[in-house]
Structures are given as C-alpha cells and as structure tokens.
Amino acid sequence: MFLFRRSGAGSSARLRALRTLYWSFTDQSTPEARARRLLREWLSPESYFEVTGSHTGRRYRIYYGTVSNFVQIDEAGQPETRWCFVPERALAAGDVMLAQKIALETDEMSVLARANRISLNLPRLHRVVRRAY
C-alpha cells in the first residue's frame, strides 16, 4: 500500500493529502453522491427536468429536491401549479426526481390523484428548511 515516514520535511503535507483523498473518495461513493451523478446525466442545462404528462400533454418541471419540487407549466412557460408527490420510501433527491419523472411520463393521472397541490406563493420547502439551519 502506501508508506509514509513520519519524520522529514513534507510528511505532514503528504498525510493531509492522503486524508483528503480518502475523504473525497468516501464522499463520492455515498448513495446521495451516486444519485447526484446520475441526475446530472438527465437534467437540462437549467438544472431541472422538463416532463410532458402521459395523459393530458401538460408540461411539468421537476426541480432538485424531494418535497414540493415539481410545478405545472402553463402555455407561456410560467409556473401554474406546484405539486408534491414522493415515493413511499425515503430516497436520495436524485432518485426521487427520476421516479417523479417516470411516473408523470407513464401514469400522469394517477400521480396527480395522489399528489398534493401547493400554493405558488409559498416558498419551496427545502429552501425554508435550509435557511433554518
């Protein structure tokens, strides 16, 4: 493996570099990090999914997050209605977004029947929670 001598010039710098490399590797292999990598492959350059509903042909935008993160878009491309629909299990945000995308593209009416409609005037929940901490 790696051999580092504790004595000598630069040994502490090498140990710090190795520790940083180790932590960056473990951070990149978490479920959340893997979900973010997969998510980046599917997102638009503006960082959201643009989805067309399977039954009505309505357009939706799914933003990063797990709660109240998708909106129905009107003809002019403006947000019309915000919705909240999440899987039963707790998943990483990227996985939730992909599940929402697939659900809207395959069974839009079932999704909207289960989803909660949320006022556009309320801030998105993940922004509120992030500010509180």
Image (cartoon, rainbow, N blue to C red):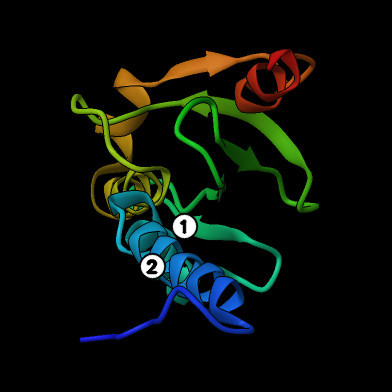
Q: Is residue 19 left or right of residue 128?
A: left
Task: List the residue tagged with mark 1.
Answer: 52
Left or right, residue 80 beside residue 64: right
Q: Residues within 10 Å of mark 2 (few under 14, many from 20)?
A: few
Q: CA distance from mark 1 to mark 2?
A: 42 Å
Q: Residue drawn at (55%, 60%), measured in percent from left and top?
A: 50
Write the residue at 28% across / 46% down: 103
Q: Nearer the viewer, residue 96 or 29?
A: 29
Q: Which label was assigned to residue 22?
A: 2
Q: Quadrant where the C terminus lies?
A: top right
Front residue of 8/74: it is 8
Nearer the N terminus, badge 1 or badge 2? 2
Up-down: is 11 above or below 131?
A: below
Residue 14 x, y percent position in the rendering: 53, 79
| Residue 21 position within the rendered picture, expressed as x and y whole percent measured from the top left | 45, 73
Q: Residue at x 19, y 24 (%)?
A: 88
